[in-house]
Image: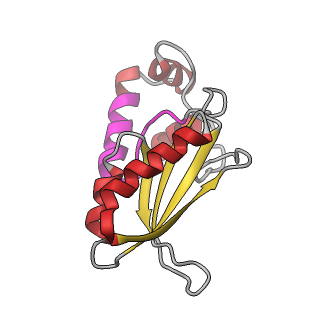
Amino acid sequence: MDSVDLALVAACQAGLPLTPRPYHAIAAQLGLTAEEVMARMQAMLQRGVIRRIGVVPNHYALGYVANGMTVWDVADEQVDALGKAVGRLGFVSHCYRRPRHLPLWPYNLFAMVHAKTRGEAEAYAARIADVLGAACRQSDILYSTRMLKKTGLRIVDQPPLS
C-alpha cells in the first residue's frame, strides 16, 4: 500500500459519505479523480487489503428489535455442509462454526437472525431446524439486549496527500 491507499482507507474507514456520488466526494477530499478512487478500492479488494464494501444497517432503527443468535448442537460430521445450507437462507445474516465448550456449552453452529418480533425469530429458528433435521440435538436463541457499535480496524489519520 502506498500513501494514497492509506489516505483512501483513512477517509473511508468511518463509512462512505451519504451522498449520491460518495466516491466523487472522497476523491474531492483527497485531490483524486473518482475513477482513481474506484480503481484503487477495487485493487485493494482484489488484494485482500479490504474485505468488502457494504451497508451496515442499524437493525433497531429499521424495526428489527428481536435479533437473535440461534445456536445449534449439530453432529460434527455434518456441521460444515449443514452450516452452508443454513448460511444460504435469506433471513440468516451470518452463520459460522465454533468449538463446543463442554459440558457447559454444547453448541457448534451459530446463525444470526433479525426479526421484528420474537415470534418471527422463533419461526426462523424453526425453519433452520427443518434444514438441520435429525443432525441437530438441541438449540437455543440468544436475543440481543442492546446494540454494540461494530467497527473494524481503525488506522491513524493520514497526513494530507502532497
Question: Which residue is drawn at the image coordinates 46% and 18% (left, top)?
Answer: 24
Residue 43 in the image: state x and y as whole percent: 31, 42
What is the basis of the colouring in this image?
secondary structure
| Image-based side of 63 in relation to 146, left or right | left
Seen from the viewer's position, the closer of residues 113 and 9 is: 113
**Is residue 35 shown above or below 136?**
above
Q: Which residues are magenta?
A: 37-56
Kindly give the residue lying farthest to the right in the view shown: 146
Question: Which residue is drawn at the image coordinates 73% and 49% (left, top)?
Answer: 145
Question: Which residue is drawn at the image coordinates 52% and 19% (left, top)?
Answer: 25
**Is residue 30 shown above or below 130?**
above
Query: Can residue 50 be found in the magenta stretch?
Result: yes
Residue 57 in the image: state x and y as whole percent: 56, 32
Query: Can residue 123 be found in the magenta stretch?
Result: no
Seen from the viewer's position, the closer of residues 144 and 159 is: 144
Residue 141 in the image: state x and y as whole percent: 57, 57
- Mark yes or no: residue 2 visible: no
Residue 153 in the image: state x and y as whole percent: 59, 54
